[in-house]
Amino acid sequence: MHIALRTYQRFEGGLNRLNLDHIHRFAKATSSDPYALLIAVMIGAPRFALNAANNNLATILMVAVQNLEESLGDRIAELETRDLISAITKPFDALAAQVLATDPSAEWLARGRTNLNIRRPTPGR
């Protein structure tokens, strides 16, 4: 990270103020997402940084916000809170549903095996 050992120890121990440069250096050194590290601190969920390290979820969010700011600028203020909540939560809910969805083929196969076993001839019939 190109910082003094003591500075790093304080950084890792949370003894210094949050330093964005150190966050970005740490993320680069650990191949993680610097924005996921920041969000993890802000939402009090350290595992978020680990879970989002490879898919760049937080960086994608920041790029999308940056693009929105570049497109709308001051007109961002015209966006209604209820519209923002709807626009942002629907895709997140859909992503969660996609990950949490069960594979219908596994359930189908399990039911089919059960039915096959029920109808299987038993010895002596």
Image: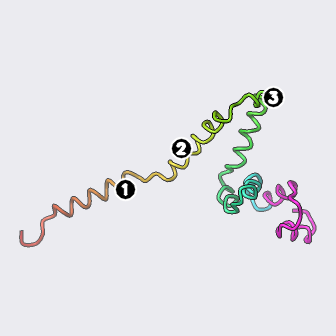
Which residue is rendered at x = 67% and y = 58% of the image?
A: 48
In magenta stretch: residue 21: yes
Residue at left offset 80%, top offset 29%: 73
Q: Badge 3 is on which residue?
A: 74
Q: Secondary structure at mark 1?
A: helix
Amino acid type at circle 3 is Asp
Gap in Å between the C-alphas at discs 1 and 2? 21 Å
- Identity of the residue drawn at 92% across and 71% down: 6
Which of the 4 quarters of the picture holds residue 51?
bottom right
Task: Identify the element where label 2 is drawn.
Answer: helix
Q: Are marks 1 and 2 in contact (CB under 8 Å)?
A: no
| Amino acid carrying mark 2 in the image | Ala
Observer-nearest of 50 and 69: 69
Pick out the residue farthest to the left: 125
Tell me how the rendering is colored.
rainbow
**Which region of the structure is painted magenta?**
1-28
Which residue lies under the disc numbered 1?
106
Q: Quadrant of residue 43?
A: bottom right
Location of mark 2 (residue): 94
Give residue 38's position: percent from left, percent from top: 77, 55
Residue closest to the eye, 29 or 90: 90
Which one is nearer the viewer's eye here, 78 or 24?
A: 78
- Which mark sits nearer the N-terminus, 1 or 2? 2
Check residue 69 for magenta coloring: no
Residues packed near mark 1 inside 10 Å, few (<14), some (14 to 19) or many (20 plus): few
**Left or right of 46, for residue 102:** left
Which label sits in the foreground, 1 or 2? Answer: 2
- Front: mark 2 or 3: 3
The local crowd at label 3, few if under 14, some if 14 to 19, many if 20 or more residues have their Cα within 10 Å, is few
